[in-house]
Amino acid sequence: MTHKIRNFGEVLWQEIEQKKLGDIGGLETVDCATDRLTVKIYHRKKIDH
């Protein structure tokens, strides 16, 4: 489960923090996540994959 959260957190980090849409706490926070990851969204914007 931890591995899935960290992988998902890395995807969120790329899409949210790098595009300045919100805050996850950086990759350090993602790498330390075990069962929870807090995401703060600043801007609404549809993200296309």
Image (tube, rainbow, N blue to C red):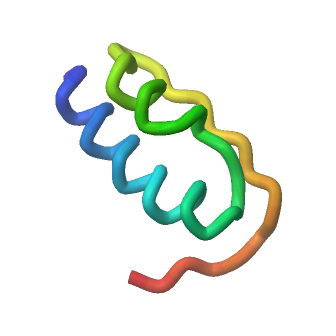
How far from the left and from the top, in percent, is residue 1?
A: 20, 23
Residue at coordinates 31% horizontally, 32% vertically from top-left? Answer: 5
On screen, residue 2 versus residue 24, left or right, reads left
| Res. 24 image quadrant | top right
Is 33 on the left or on the right of 6, as rendered?
A: right
Q: How many marks?
A: 0
Q: Nearer the viewer, residue 36 or 31?
A: 31
Residue 8: quarter of image: top left
- Residue that lies at the very extreme toward the bottom in this rendered image: 48
Q: Quadrant of the C terminus?
A: bottom left
Location of residue 48 in the rendering, given as x and y in whole percent from the top left corner: 48, 85
Establish if 9 lies above or below 33.
below
Residue at horizontal 60 percent and vertical 29 percent from the top: 38
Nearer to me, 18 or 42:
18
Above or below — where is 2 with respect to 25? above
Residue 9 picture location, percent across and down: 39, 41
Q: Look at 38% across and 20% down and name the residue there.
A: 33
Left or right relative to 32: residue 48: right
Tell me residue 28's x, y (percent): 43, 27
